[in-house]
Amino acid sequence: MKNINIADSFNVELKEDENVDNTRRKVFEAAYSFVTPLQPSKPQLIHVSMDMAKSLGIDPKSVHSEEFLNIVSGKEVYPNTRPYAMAYAGHQFGSWAGQLGDGRAINLFEVEHNHKRWALQLKGAGPTPYSRQGDGLAVLRSSIREYLCSEAMFHLNVPTTRALSLVLTGDEVLRDMLYDGNAAYEKGAIVCRVAPTFIRFGNFELFAARQDFKNLKALTDYTIRYFFPHLGAPSKEVYISFFREVANRTLDMIVHWQRVGFVHGVMNTDNMSILGLTIDYGPYGWLEGFDFGWTPNTTDRQNKRYRYGNQPNIALWNLLQLANALFPLVEEAKPFEAILHKYQTDFDQKFLDMMRSKLGLQTSSKQDKSLIDNLQDCLLMAETDMTIFFRNLASYEKDKDAIKAILMPALYRPKEISPKSLELWSQWFKAYGQRLGKETLSNKARKGAMNKINPKYVLRNYMAQMAIDEANGGNYQLIEELFTMLKKPYDEQTEYEKWFAKRPEWARHKVGCSMLSCSS
């Protein structure tokens, strides 16, 4: 990793915690605390994203060097840098949680390459002042899930943080996976996460809640200067413009989530990126059966606050909390209220446009919303695999048996679909065919366009769990296979056809394949 262009800013320009003891505590009037990663006993590189390494200006030949391994495992600190943990607060499951912070993440340094800024962060590299009761470590299963998913989301064209590397620490970590009192030791691991910045809504909430307006302004000015420079010099008007852009980026991210059927699982305000990136991959999942009420998070099983259908509303609620945090800098509520109101109307339009693209519609019609609503009603009548259905829909041809060719391969239990449901499906395909008749694209051109929107391959939970099971046995080949396949999720990739399939029945209730806990 020699000769990378270190360009630290966050831990240079913002206020540091003057207490350098790595003890769990409340931290006041500081944006971060300096902390040194825990020494791993026997680090081992499992996988590295060569694309991400290239984006950082890292020589491909060096990624298998001892120096690289030592840096991304926390064994060594890169020369002339000072690792740190961020201070932030947040609302968790709708309730104010107070100070949170990087409890198991340690920021290494920032890099500039090809006019882009990147921050590198180790997740699972030991305790920080913000670890509360935790040990600051991560286990192999959660690390594999984050590593694979963040890179998969990038290639799905969903705004996301990235991952550089996946490392075994050689140490064992005690975890109660299901929160049922049956703790057990698991293999420890570290993911090196990468993003332009890891600043969250919660960073602003912390200072606002404590009425630390000096640091609130410093953080906001810093964020605008480095990540929203086109908005101009900080002022009340620019703070409003800043919030507007954060809202727009968040909205775009949510629309992408809904497009591919991704459910985050823990949309707390401390898990919301100020850049509108998907951040903190915990108990996430992709819809298997199309279901607005599904959440992958066992902690959220009862209230389902973070269910698939509620993600747009939760993003709006979280934006409201960010608006409250930024209010002291503006001291006017109406501009924030207008932006939040516009989020609602913009979402309706952007969701409609997104669904049109999934259906291969290049033009708009007043009947489109009804067509989409009726489709969603049909999808809910029986357990229908969202990914397979929309991918198959690209092959629709008039006068062909669409139910047999498109719907049936996406149904989990075809025998459970009633004659009435089949009739409604027939009516929908007839309406869809009539609507396509108003389009000018050929079937071939429409299929090509739809296949760029509707992925063929996504990281289903059972696939990640299979990779985890093999990795626990020392075999990392499936990690490589999935990683390679998910770099081209919209391509046919016939060599990976076995992964274009519904979740198998054995995975329906298997731990790690359906719902997961936050400890995952």
Image (spheres, rainbow, N blue to C red):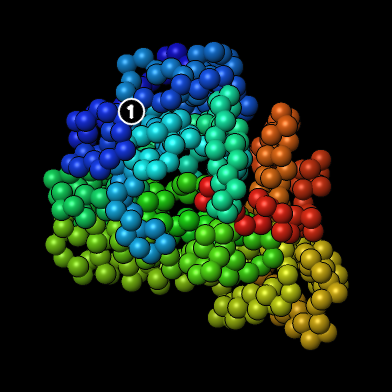
From the top left corner, tell me how far across and down residue 153 is, in percent. Answer: 57, 46
Which residue is located at x 43 percent, y 31 percent? Answer: 126
Q: Is residue 71 visible?
A: no
Which residue is located at x 57 percent, y 78 percent? Answer: 369
Residue 80 lies left or right of residue 218; in this view the side is right
Most distant residue in the bottom direction: 420
Q: Is residue 96 above or below residue 122?
A: below
Q: Is residue 29 visible?
A: yes
Which residue is located at x 52 percent, y 55 percent? Answer: 264
From the top left corner, tell me how far across and down residue 218 is, in percent. Answer: 18, 42
Q: Residue 343 lies in what quarter of the image?
A: bottom left
Q: Which residue is mark 1?
A: 35
Q: Which class describes the residues within 10 Å of circle 1: few (<14), some (14-19), or many (20+)?
A: many
From the top left corner, tell me how far across and down residue 151 is, in percent. Answer: 57, 40
Residue 179 lies left or right of residue 204; in this view the side is right
Which residue is located at x 67 percent, y 52 percent? Answer: 511
